[in-house]
Amino acid sequence: MKTTSLFIVLILSSSWAASADEQDHFLHCLSQTCHNYSSISNVVYTPSNSSYTSILESSIRNTRFLSESTPKPQVIITPDHETQIPPVILCAKQSGLEIRTRSGGHDMEGLSYVSQVPFAIVDLVNLSQVTVDVDEKTAWIGAGASTGVVYYRIAEKSPTLAFPGSICTWVGVGGHYSRGGYGALLRKYGLAADNVIDMRIVNVNGNILDRESMGEDLFWAIRGGGGASFGVITAWKVQLVDVPETVTVFSITRSVEEQNGAELWQRWQYVAPQADKDLFVGVIVFRVNTTVLVNFFSVYQGGADILVSYMQEIFPELGLVREDCTEMSWIQSTLFSNQMPIDQLDAVLNRTQPGLRQLKAKSDYVQTPLPLNVIEDMVSMLREPEADETNYYMVPYGGIMEEISEFETPFPHRAGALYQLAGLTYWQDSEAADTDRY
Ligand SMILES: Cc1cc2nc3c(=O)[nH]c(=O)nc-3n(C[C@H](O)[C@H](O)[C@H](O)COP(=O)(O)OP(=O)(O)OC[C@H]3O[C@@H](n4cnc5c(N)ncnc54)[C@H](O)[C@@H]3O)c2cc1C
Ligand SMILES: *[C@@H]1O[C@H](CO)[C@@H](O)[C@H](O)[C@H]1NC(C)=O
Ligand SMILES: *[C@@H]1O[C@H](CO)[C@@H](O)[C@H](O)[C@H]1NC(C)=O
Ligand SMILES: *[C@@H]1O[C@H](CO)[C@@H](O)[C@H](O)[C@H]1NC(C)=O
Ligand SMILES: *[C@@H]1O[C@H](CO)[C@@H](O)[C@H](O)[C@H]1NC(C)=O
Ligand SMILES: *[C@@H]1O[C@H](CO)[C@@H](O)[C@H](O)[C@H]1NC(C)=O
């Protein structure tokens, strides 16, 4: 008897391993493990479900990973309650499927929805509720929410509360907060992760933990160490921050060829990281036809008159005047930073990012200002034909980032990091054959 059943087990296990039907094993396990299978079966998609492809592609933000050769998941689960996640984790382990967890899908290398081994995607798109408590100045945020939805829900409740998250309002909070997360309030309030005060996560054993039950070590690690290293985060509790009713923005552009753009960029390195915490001035450098342009984009936590006189004091070379500045609410400034019309606030609720292309990006932290000759070399690289949709994107650090210890969270770029310098290059799908050149 014993020999026979062992034989059967061997046959069964080798057959499902060898013929790659992890998927059948997973679905069978799920139907056995879930107390109420019908409540989860309507959030489980395999390639035979008609909406499988649209769900898979709905959060692919880098069209490089829309190609047919990109490995596809055997199953996608879109939980609408956190209690559905433990059986998914346990059954994925039993069936030999790795899990990729996806919130906003903005990972630059598709890590939330691509794997080289058989895998399942847990897509948190429907765990995206945001509950704001104005009196406590806190919010609980479902991991599948985008940062734009968070900003909108806060502004709905109060014009003088905010949260320091990404500039890009399409980014998901699951990946963003667990990796640090910077935006225009970084110099005043630090990273998104610095303002997380509690969270809920499902760990590898299928246990649902909050800050108290996970302990301070794990709580430390997740705020910068990447969520997927530790489990599936289902929600964050964050501390909201104060903003004035009126902030001021500007976006001004100087060409390298005729308006000293390169010299201004060089000078910016000495100004922006040292400036008052209320001032954020980022830089984007890009080429239009044969002209290289240096754009300075800013959000100031105060009124325009003070900003203009302060800029004339610390950065007179830029020549900022009152007409360059616009006063608005903080929520409007989040739209302004994404070149969206500021009178249509609910546009940030739209998860679909316009103009998706193929993308490759890298970033680094500058500790010593670049000399002008290096800046000129970087400008020359933008003149190459492949760089027609390339930009350098610079985010000033300093301010409170200097005051937070590099051990406070796993995110170490604090004192001494002048600014983050990213290089992003985009190309159209029609140019995909030339991917390596880009
Ligand atoms: C166009 C664009 C603009 C950006 N702008 C900014 C910016 O202004 N500021 C900034 O700081 N960053 C910015 N980023 C980077 C972005 O914050 C990170 O890529 C972030 O990880 C994206 O989070 P996501 O949830 O959208 O990504 P996903 O692709 O869903 O996930 C990213 C990673 O986190 C893991 N993960 C996601 N959700 C969870 C979860 N719930 N539990 C556990 N692990 C999870 C994934 O498995 C993956 O490894 C930008 C990226 C892009 C493409
Ligand atoms: C099972 O889940 C379905 C869908 O959520 C629900 O309608 C049904 O009442 C549940 N059944 C039991 C026995 O809980
Ligand atoms: C996917 O198809 C299976 C089998 O036909 C079905 O049981 C399941 O409910 C479908 N899932 C969804 C989300 O429609
Ligand atoms: C889940 O999210 C998708 C995409 O946002 C949406 O179309 C769908 O209605 C959501 N389902 C539920 C049950 O909320
Ligand atoms: C760049 O070149 C294109 C095509 O020649 C032209 O249509 C466009 O106006 C130019 N843009 C600028 C800013 O000069
Ligand atoms: C959301 O944005 C996309 C991309 O800009 C657009 O095509 C779509 O119409 C928008 N949806 C809504 C409901 O506004």
Image: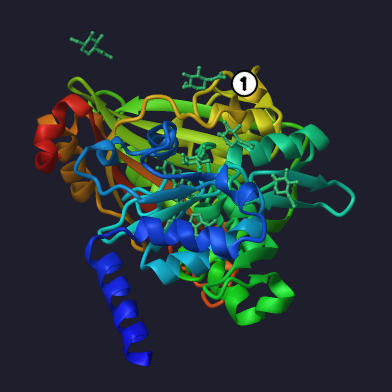
User: Residue 169: which quarter of the image?
Assistant: top right
Q: How is the image coloured?
A: rainbow
* Viewer-proximal residue among 433 and 275: 433
Q: Is residue 140 above or below residue 339?
A: below
Q: In the rendered view, does 141 fall on the left or right side of 313?
A: right
Amino acid at circle 1 = Ile
The answer to whether residue 1 is above or below residue 122 is below
Helix, strand or loop at label 1? It is loop
Residue at the extreme front: 1
The N terminus lies in which quarter of the figure? bottom left
Q: Residue at x 36, y 68 (%)?
A: 96
Q: Nearer the viewer, residue 182 or 126?
A: 126
Looking at the picture, tell me which residue is in the foreground, 234 or 162. 234
In the image, residue 213 sits, relative to residue 310, either above or below, namely: below
Whether residue 277 appears in this view of the structure is: no
Q: Residue extending furthest right?
A: 135
